[in-house]
Amino acid sequence: MHQQKRQPELVEGNLPVFVFPTELIFYADDQSTHKQVLTLYNPYEFALKFKVLCTTPNKYVVVDAAGAVKPQCCVDIVIRHRDVRSCHYGVIDKFRLQVSEQSQRKALGRKEVVATLLPSAKEQQKEEEEKRIKEHLTESLFFEQSFQPGKNKSVSSGPSLLTVFLGVVCIAALMLPTLGDVESLVPLYLHLSVNQKLVAAYILGLITMAILRT
């Protein structure tokens, strides 16, 4: 009776699979990263069988590529990169974890995990830092231009169209309902969180100051 009641939910391919992490990054200059661990979680009330597949099995060694996970338990799957060469830098490989109920052969669910080999962890951190600096400079330049009055006031006697547009957007955001307001007729996807409204209010204040100084 219990199996018949649960069976309609166990449709092939529809069972959510919980894996962490969902991305593996190997660094050629750091041997400690050549071995990664995937954790497969089983939050269900029944045991699961699992199997790990890979698009390029010749590049990796998967310890315990098949096994079982007890109900409400987890299992660690060790993956080692065994072909660390420069020709593989930046190539995206994929692992697929398939799970099924122990009494069945059909895969009830599957999850893909991407794997990438990069030359150096330091280079990756440097690129991320440069990206953050560029974003910061772009934001600083925008606010600096917003606060600076026009060089020729006879030509530009008022705020720019971009400033006015941003102000209107912020005002509209503040007028939208807050998340949790169940009595609103506005669609749920237009409800904003308190933090989002605080950001809109902050930007609106900056725009107001910029307009007053023009």
Image (cartoon, rainbow, N blue to C red):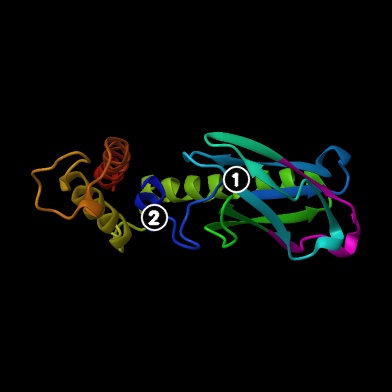
Q: Nearer the viewer, mark 2 or mark 1?
A: 2
Residue at 34%, 50% in the rendered image: 5
Marks 2 and 1 in Cβ contact (< 8 Å): no
One can see residue 58 in this view: yes
| Disc marking residue 33 | none
Q: Is residue 21 above or below residue 185?
A: above
Residue 62 pos. (x, y %): 80, 50
Residue 187 lies in what quarter of the image?
bottom left
Q: Identify which residue, 181 or 168, lies in the foreground.
A: 181
Residue 63 lies in what quarter of the image?
top right
Mark 2 or mark 1, earlier in chain: 2
The residue singled out by tag 2 in the image is 9
User: At label 2, which amino acid type do we have?
Assistant: Glu
Residue at 15%, 46% in the rendered image: 175
Q: Would residue 154 be found to the left or right of residue 96 on screen? A: left
One can see residue 122 in this view: no
Residue 180 pos. (x, y %): 19, 38
Residue at 65%, 44% in the rendered image: 68
Helix, strand or loop under label 2 = helix
Q: Is residue 129 magenta?
A: no
Q: Which residues are magenta?
A: 77-95
Q: Would residue 208 be found to the left or right of residue 110 on screen? A: left
Q: Is residue 33 above or below residue 158?
A: above
Residue at 25%, 56% in the rendered image: 164
Q: Identify which residue, 51 or 197, lies in the foreground.
A: 51
Q: Would residue 200 be found to the left or right of residue 102 on screen? A: left
| Disc marking residue 132 | 1
Q: CA distance from mark 2 to mark 1?
A: 45 Å
Residue 171 pos. (x, y %): 20, 48
